Amino acid sequence: MEIKNDSSSTSGFTLLGISSNPHLQKPLFAIFLIMYLVTIVGNILIILAIHSDSRLHTPMYFFLSNLSFMDICFTTVIVPKMLVNFLSDTKSISYVGCLIQMYFFMAFGNTDSYLLASMAIDRLVAICNPLHYDVVMNPRRCLLMLLVSCTISHLHSMLRVLLMSQLSFCASHVVKHFFCDTKPVLKLSCSDTSSSQTVVMTETLAVIATPFLCILFSYLRIIITVLRIPSAAGKWKAFSTCGSHLTVVVLFYGSAIYVYSRPLSIYSGVKDRAATLMYTVVTPMLNPFIYSLRNKDMKKSMRKLRFRIHS
């Protein structure tokens, strides 16, 4: 990758972080360290529970275990550097380090969104076409869906980082964020970013909107099918299988759409940092609780896993 701006590549950037108040740095370090550890342990337990229980070797739990793995990667791209900066006076990140962080953040984050769409398709087939479920959602197709999700996400990230690497940064190098995200870094460029903004906005909306529209379409079909079920118990049983997934979708997409659907001209550092924390730190931490507390099969597998660990 060719780097045009020598001053940026040598001096790098300074990450403003969540708060510039020096008295809040250690308390924030403790809070986010606990959240990070809970995220890592919780998602690892989800993966171990699924892989250790043959009853959970189904498409839905295949996607869930991969979602948990992506959540671990997703938060690890951001949180460790953020924790170091809480205890550091410089809070710096190199130019190349910033681009690398941006690349993997987008790659893992977009893979998350496509996995959520894959899980919605799984629920659609299970509820609307149960007799053909095993044929439609066969292991080969599930693996193909995972590979397509990863490929599209990494190609998107590569394009974005290549665009960013062509910009020059000759003014302030203070990124008003706790990691290298596209909008706050674009705000620092002294290049003409109009074309980059257009490409970024168009491509981002396409990448975010595609899985989101897929989820909306799937749940519209699911609702229509469930409403045709005559018994109230049957309707509740069908809806209950979607509850955990729908909760995660609302948490993830609610904040992500708020951050990335608005133009750069109305970017707000404080509001965007708060919304970004929701889908980068809070949602990955809550996912294991949402799926384990609302799912009987996961509860049983978690109890079995706990018994094996203690025995």
Image: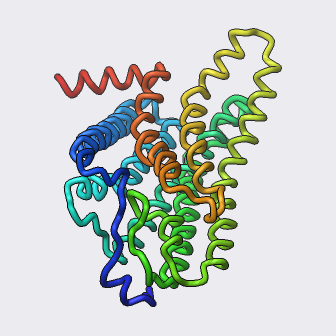
In the displayed structure image, the side of residue 201 where residue 157 appears, left or right: left
Q: Nearer the viewer, residue 138 or 83?
A: 83
- Quarter-wise, where is residue 85 in the image? bottom left
In the displayed structure image, the side of residue 64 where residue 212 appears, left or right: right
| Residue 200 image point, x, y percent | 62, 69
Q: Nearer the viewer, residue 156 or 238?
A: 156
Query: What colouring style does the render use?
Result: rainbow
- Quarter-wise, where is residue 300 in the image? top left
| Residue 266 image point, x, y percent | 62, 59
Classify 267 as above or below 38.
below
In the displayed structure image, the side of residue 153 where residue 10 appears, left or right: left
Residue located 36% across and 39% down the image: 43
Residue located 60% across and 37% down the image: 250
| Residue 112 image point, x, y percent | 52, 50
- Quarter-wise, where is residue 137 in the image? top right
In the displayed structure image, the side of residue 311 where residue 122 appears, left or right: right
